[in-house]
Amino acid sequence: MIMSRQYLNWRLFFTLVIRIKINQMKYTLAIIFSIFIVKLPAQEKQFSKDEQGKFIYYQVVDSQVVSKAVLLERAKHFIHSSNKKLMKPERSTDTSVLANGKLIIDKTILVAGHPSGEVNYNFVFEAREGKYRFWLTDFEYIPYQRDRYGNFVATTNIGTPLEKRVDKLNAGTWKDIQASAYAKAVKFADSFKKFLATDKKVPEPVKKEVISTRKW
Amino acid sequence: MKKFLTAIFAMAGTTCALAQETPTSPLEISGSVDTYFKYDFAKQPNNITTSFATDHNSVSLGMIDLVLKKTTGKASFVGELSFGPRGQEQSLLDASSNGSSFHIQNLYVNYDFTDQFSITAGYMGTFVGYEVISPVGNFNYSTSYLFTSGPFQNAGIKATYKFSDKVSLMAGLFNDWNVYTATRGVSSIGGQLMVSPVEGWTAYINVLSGAGGGGYGTIEDLTTSYQVTDKFKLGLNAANYDINNDGGGYAGVALYPQFAFTDAVSLGLRGEYFKTKNVAGFGATKYTAVTLTANIKSGGLTFIPEVRLDHNGDKPFFKENGLAAPNAGQFSLAAVYAF
């Protein structure tokens, strides 16, 4: 009797364990599946390549409201008003603006981090009536290293093309750099488009209401 | 000295109004961890007496190094703390009576009055020399005689003016070497001229005069590196230190050719000639040292295998049986992780 009760208890215990395991597996599979789903579009977010095999971030934007001349002015204004360390104008024509830019790549440790390198690029902007296009290309990565004073500075002046294939030892790090550069390029493009779509006329100063406590 | 300080603050005052606002950065956290195994060919600990990697036939600790940096507008600070033999008793003077060492590598504040002009005050890594305490900043794991003999840190106040990306000038007043509190007052004056004549070539001409190692003296130092191609880099350090009143000093030169075979694997050589000077007419001696080092990188981790051979005709080294020897050699394998 005791044996059979023990046997039943064990059986019940194992049945419960197996059920929990199956449930856990379901959750595990669901989690893996969801990660896979999330991972797929994340992997797609990479630079496209141009006809020379170089990474390029290219956009054509429809702009029926703003004229070509205003677009060019705003593009120049954007470049000149940017942080001088991150963007330098090169030259401009009647239809285009060229500049050199820099994207700072960060290494994040939990919530804080530090700059780990920079990606230099060439920026080209061209405008026509009703639309404009711009692209970032010639991406070159320069790693940073901490100097004797605790500041992160460039280790070399010779950049590595971002589309270059690296050896297996550093493939993971290189992929992270490419992904980070892409994310920064997207952010840059968003701010550029927003700048070009916005009228920069100085708004009328709003009269500040002064509240007097003398009157009720 | 008063004139110097007055000049600095006058310059700061006039340029302050021209300064541009710079954005506030998040708190930066970085650092490194290193460990090593060293085997002395004569089985003698401390046969080669340059800094760090002192233990023989032992898997030993370097240090954990933690760096904080924050920029708010034009002001910034850096605080760097290190724990472990390399970052405590091997690089810093004992500052308390029980022999336990403080472990501050950098602790300073900086203010950028303009894009060109800044003032920094506090305890800073020295501006003299090629090699540094942090293993992340060096290609070789063992260190040169020039590094070991020179200053490690200077506490003081310095002003830097950047004429262009190719030329900058620093001048400052400092305590004696490697101390948080001046033992002989703010007793040193130092300067650094940075020039970058061609793309990839940077040279620092340094002078530090005042209270230092062994007495009052003057160091003249040239530290330069040239990234000749994307694979080949050449570094050079040359220094001369004279201590007043026939108190000795040193002179030396070290050459650092490095070649990157792939993104992950580089090989570098350090060839050094170093001599100490006579103290009251005696004691001068000469070293030559050759160090062959590889850097194998994977992400933040760097493996550093290294073979080093030193020679001195005055036989300061030891054989396995304890007799004096003119040569010493060692192998080491270090792992350094930077984050």
Image (cartoon, rainbow, N blue to C red):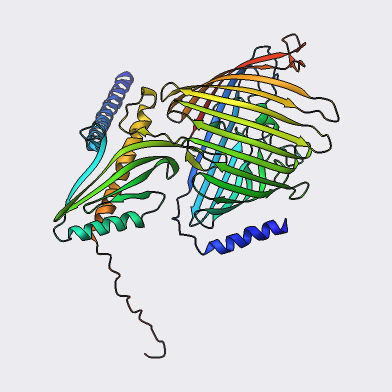
A70 sits left or right of B208 in the view = left
B324 sits left or right of B18 in the view = right
Along the line of sight, which residue is nearer the eye, B29 or B218? B218
B233 sits left or right of B93 in the view = left
Q: Residue at position x 13%, y 56% from top?
A: A130
Along the line of sight, which residue is nearer the eye, B108 or B119? B119
Above or below for B66 versus A205: above
- What is the x, y in percent for residue B136? 53, 32
Q: Residue at position x 29%, y 45% from top?
A: A123
How many numbered markers are drawn?
0
Q: Residue at position x 76%, y 35% from top?
A: B242
Above or below for B117 versus B36: below
- What is the x, y in percent for residue A39? 25, 35
Can you see residue A195? no
**Quarter residue B58 falls in:** top right
Residue located farthest toward the right when viewing the structure as drawn: B280
**Quarter residue A32 falls in:** top left
Along the line of sight, which residue is nearer the eye, B274 or B156? B274
Q: Residue at position x 36%, y 79% from top?
A: A208
**Quarter residue A79 falls in:** bottom left
Above or below for B186 versus B53: below
Residue located farthest toward the bottom when viewing the structure as drawn: A215
Can you see residue A133? yes
- What is the x, y in percent for residue B76? 53, 52
- Quadrant location, the N terminus of chain B: bottom right
- What is the x, y in percent for residue A143? 43, 36
